[in-house]
Amino acid sequence: MSMSGSDPARARLRLSSESGLAELAVIDSWFRAVEEGTGELDCQLEPGIYEIVARAGPSIERRLIKLVGGEDRPEIAPEVRFPATPPIRGSLAEDDRQLALVHAATGSLAGAADGAGRRGDVNGMTERADTTTATGRTTLGSHP
C-alpha cells in the first residue's frame, strides 16, 4: 500500500507484533476498534490519538500513539508475555537459568546421538524424536 495516490491528510500505520502471533487492534478516540488482525496490520487512518492493543491468550498490553497527516509509520506492538508451562521465549515462564539448562541438556544429547532423530530448531533448541543415546537412555521430543 503506497501513500502516493492516497489522501495526504491520512496517515499510514504499519503495525506488527514481534512474535507474529499476537492479536492486534487499533482503537480510536471514540473507543471503537478501527482495525483488527493477527500479527500485522497495514491501515490508513485519520490523524489523531490511537490506542494500540496487543493480546496473546489472557495477556493484554496497550500503548497510545499519535498519528500525523501524511505520516508513514512503522510500529512494533507492545510485547505481550503470555502464560506457558515450558520456558518459551516471550512467555511468562521464560527464565534465563532454565533456558540455559535446557540448551545445555539439548546440546549434550545432540552430541551423544550424533544428530540422529533431529527434527528442527525451536527457540534455539533442537527438537528430537524418540532417540536412544550413547548411554542407552531414550530422549523424548515432538512427533509429527
Image (tube, rainbow, N blue to C red):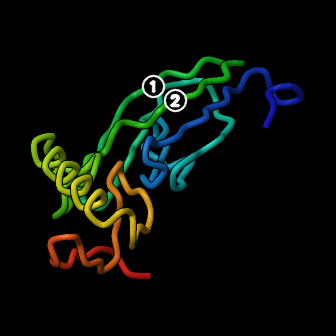
Other residues around mark 2 within 10 Å, as few (<14) / some (14–19) / many (≥20): some
The correct choice, above or below, for 41 with respect to 51 in the image is below
Q: Nearer the viewer, residue 130 or 9?
A: 130
Q: Which residue is mark 1?
A: 65
Q: Is residue 25 above or below residue 10?
A: below
Q: Amino acid at mark 1?
A: Ile
Q: Quadrant of the N terminus?
A: top right
Instruction: Depth check: give the residue in front, 87 or 13.
Output: 87
Direction right: furthest residue:
5
How many other residues sit within 10 Å of disc 1, few (<14), some (14-19) or many (≥20)?
Answer: few
- Asked whether 62 or 18 is in front, the reply is 18
Q: Are marks 2 and 1 in contact (CB under 8 Å)?
A: yes
User: Mark 2 highlights which residue?
Assistant: 75
Identify the element where label 2 is drawn.
strand
Quadrant where the C terminus sits is: bottom left
Position of residue 10 measured from the top left corner of the image (x, y, whole percent): 70, 27
Side of 64 where 67 appears, left or right: right
